[in-house]
Image (cartoon, coloured by chain):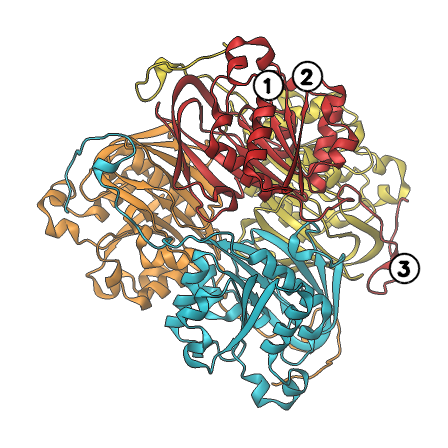
Chain colours: A yellow, B red, C orange, D cyan
Amino acid sequence: MIKVTVWNEYVHEKEHELVQKIYPEGIHKAIAKGLTFMAAEDELSVRTATLEQPEHGLSEEILKNTDVLIWWGHCAHDQVQDGIVERVHSRVLQGMGLIVLHSGHFSKIFKRLMGTPCALKWREAGERERLWVVNPGHPIAEGIGPCIELENTEMYGEPFSIPEPEEQVFISWFEGGEVFRSGNCWHRGNGKVFYFRPGHETYPIYHDKTIQRVIYNAVKWARPQGWWKDISEGPNVPTEKAPEPIKQKGGSVH
Amino acid sequence: MIKVTVWNEYVHEKEHELVQKIYPEGIHKAIAKGLTFMAAEDELSVRTATLEQPEHGLSEEILKNTDVLIWWGHCAHDQVQDGIVERVHSRVLQGMGLIVLHSGHFSKIFKRLMGTPCALKWREAGERERLWVVNPGHPIAEGIGPCIELENTEMYGEPFSIPEPEEQVFISWFEGGEVFRSGNCWHRGNGKVFYFRPGHETYPIYHDKTIQRVIYNAVKWARPQGWWKDISEGPNVPTEKAPEPIKQKGGSVH
Amino acid sequence: MIKVTVWNEYVHEKEHELVQKIYPEGIHKAIAKGLTFMAAEDELSVRTATLEQPEHGLSEEILKNTDVLIWWGHCAHDQVQDGIVERVHSRVLQGMGLIVLHSGHFSKIFKRLMGTPCALKWREAGERERLWVVNPGHPIAEGIGPCIELENTEMYGEPFSIPEPEEQVFISWFEGGEVFRSGNCWHRGNGKVFYFRPGHETYPIYHDKTIQRVIYNAVKWARPQGWWKDISEGPNVPTEKAPEPIKQKGGSVH
Amino acid sequence: MIKVTVWNEYVHEKEHELVQKIYPEGIHKAIAKGLTFMAAEDELSVRTATLEQPEHGLSEEILKNTDVLIWWGHCAHDQVQDGIVERVHSRVLQGMGLIVLHSGHFSKIFKRLMGTPCALKWREAGERERLWVVNPGHPIAEGIGPCIELENTEMYGEPFSIPEPEEQVFISWFEGGEVFRSGNCWHRGNGKVFYFRPGHETYPIYHDKTIQRVIYNAVKWARPQGWWKDISEGPNVPTEKAPEPIKQKGGSVH
């Protein structure tokens, strides 16, 4: 059983009628439903969390019970408390998977893990996007076919200021003439990170079965395979406990 | 002419007689002298900066005139102001090279760029270290030979919690039985980052000609080759300026 | 059920009494037994194949029924037929996992997949080796602890002329003063490749429970997750079948 | 002075009038002229070589005097002798740069270095291509601007079965709806390899000043920075010459 938490800032859905119509229960609920629909019985346990909850719904207890965290945010990135970001960061390093969706490219947690601005070009013209699978053998592309077509999307264009992806799964073609690295994998510490471009508050993209399948695949790919609990510790190895017998030499300020 | 700034927290040298004897003018001056010694005429312009100076000696003006920054710190990492770290971070992303030495693995700037804890094991027993060149063709290893031997060093041991290096130049063997990835390269944005393990306040390692040669090589490797000034910007491309003619479709909350 | 084939050139064991004593049934049988011992019921199906068999025991039929191939060879690399190497290569590209052991670094199939000489330094002095886990979260290191100690091993030393590993799991320390990248992961096409250093015909290394555990872990890591059957094909997409409607323009020699 | 050899199979130009009109002296001469035009005085020394010459114009002597080799081939890949491919391969591993153009993706030397099929989809419809710079700081993109537009090109589409690029410089958008990783960097041994997609025998692409600039940039990027002459050798280190004093232990078949 993989324990999944879907996080959403949950702001647009309460403020704009247009968004409400598409995601009446919020984007997080739509993503959670998609996962539940895709999963076999007892394969996933899915909960949601939002910005407005205490500790943004990401308490130590909840994170301890999260194997994979899905992140959606757009207009409220700077309202996420730094302390919570560090908590999530720490959990990813120990082994929790993280899936960052669409405008989450500018979230504090994604930029924190990448070490770069994660900036990009954009255009909201409702244009056609085609995501090509560049790595047909990758588990995240399982059952997807050669490409995914989305009739109305916001455009994201290169250059995307990220570290070179360790593995690429999707590259997007846009009607307006741009391209984008749309599905990228990294390791950070013991955690796997997947960035997936599609999704927007004014298009019903998270109701799309193929998009749901990719997110479901990504959850399975990102699940922890063991934990590296002490990844942030820098322990001393006393001279008398060195693997090979050695004698203390030289000076020290300690 | 490559403009180099050597940064040092410059604390141990003023507090411990032992360190003063080895680095009477500070570690930064020793590194600067080594670079000047190695360089051809008009090849490098080297200045130094320290924690105690206004803005830690890293004003906008000085950074604008720095092509490669060398970083040494050990006991005062948390005294480096976050604003200055962001300034250095921003400059690296735009293209400035960064060389992080020894205990700088725990500096704010290195952890900020890596996105991971950069933790390791350590032991101060003055033991022998042998750095093997694993990539004889790499420009940072030019003129070095198959390995570097250091008679007295602090041990750093794996696991070193960094993102997988893009290129490795050195791996260390220690008398006490450990190993360490001692010379590692990454890109972050348009900047090159090199971590180099050797160095300690109580050993005369930065007076060693071979170590000076590696640092000199690394400066040349890390020098900017153009700048990506707007790497942090996320510009809109209006529909009417799309490379291919498209029509506005779909809804928007803007 | 993961279908494993353990391949061995099976030469030393028949020619040298010393080797016979350690591996009376051949190295392949020792590795196969270790896997069977480690695996849960119905988790693995293990068979062996050797150089002397028709088609080296690697017929199309057998490869079609192999998910992960383990390769051991030392003195007879050049007796492996090129056609069989191409067949194995093709199967790896489609998705079969490949685990290359010890002196297999010079096998035709490993060099074919890497594109580099895969050369290294060596010494047969029966010295102590300590393999450090540099990536404690990696599934191949599951249950291993911080390091593996082997009392008598052949030394392999850097530089190891391989492409930069995508993931590193182990780095070795040797009593005689060298280091080596001992556990390295790559993808080639849809197949996963793991090189694991330990093993030699005159030391009982494949009877070691920890080494068996690593090989078992590697088999699970390298198992295929879907197949890319047409990876070698370069299909034409006729103009009238382009995803976007376009008109034929320009000249052609066809 | 960087010594460049431009290699061309030189077949289409002699057989098709259409190709002759565009490249009357052959594609190799057009590329060589572009390089000479771009270079400062005494910066490059450019020669050409073709399939029909003795040893395909790639004798030991000529390769020894080549720093960067540019490769163009399309319909005669299988006429290139394996021995010459091995010779080029060996020189790349030692440090020679290699730039593979367009249909060279299926050349023996490129597949040999990559270890994968390097297959792709294609369509010859003379459609528009736009190559986006995904890495504005990369030396190969110097002076190029955000994208390169080519009005008539052959389409190459993903999946491109190559190992994950170490650095990506260009990704292509095609009018017909596909995308492609069009500018990719790898290291193999001590040599740098750059694959650059544009170019075709029936379009005047190598007369384009921006394309010439990219090839010129790539030559400078790929130039050797030292040589790793013995990369293919696997030397023994006798026990008495081990860096640390050790005693011979254990058995051996030698």
Name the mark nearer the viewer: 1 or 2.
1
Label 1 packing within 10 angstroms: few (<14), some (14-19), many (20+): few
Q: Chain of mark 3?
A: B
Mark 3 or mark 2, earlier in chain: 2
Q: Quadrant of the C terminus of chain C?
A: bottom right
Query: Same chain, marks 3 and 1?
Result: yes
Mark 3 or mark 1, earlier in chain: 1
From the viewer's perspective, is D87 left or right of A19? left
* Front residue (pair D57, B115): D57
Farthest-out residue, left = C17
Amino acid marked by disc 2? Gln
Query: Same chain, marks 1 and 2?
Result: yes
Amino acid marked by disc 3? Glu
* Residue C55 screen position, x and y as percent: 26, 65
Q: Does dot 3 land on a helix, a strand or a loop?
A: helix
From the viewer's perspective, is A19 left or right of B102? right
Please report the residue visible at 48 percent of the width from the left and 79 percent of the height from the top. D51
Residue B25 is marked as: 1
* Residue A76 screen position, x and y as percent: 81, 33
Q: Chain of mark 1?
A: B
Farthest-out residue, front = B41
Please report the residue visible at 61 percent of the width from the left and 28 percent of the height from the top. B71
For label 2, the residue is: B79
For label 3, the residue is: B240
Please report the residue visible at 87 percent of the width from the left and 59 percent of the height from the top. B241
Q: Quadrant of residue D204?
A: bottom right
* Residue C203 screen position, x and y as percent: 20, 38
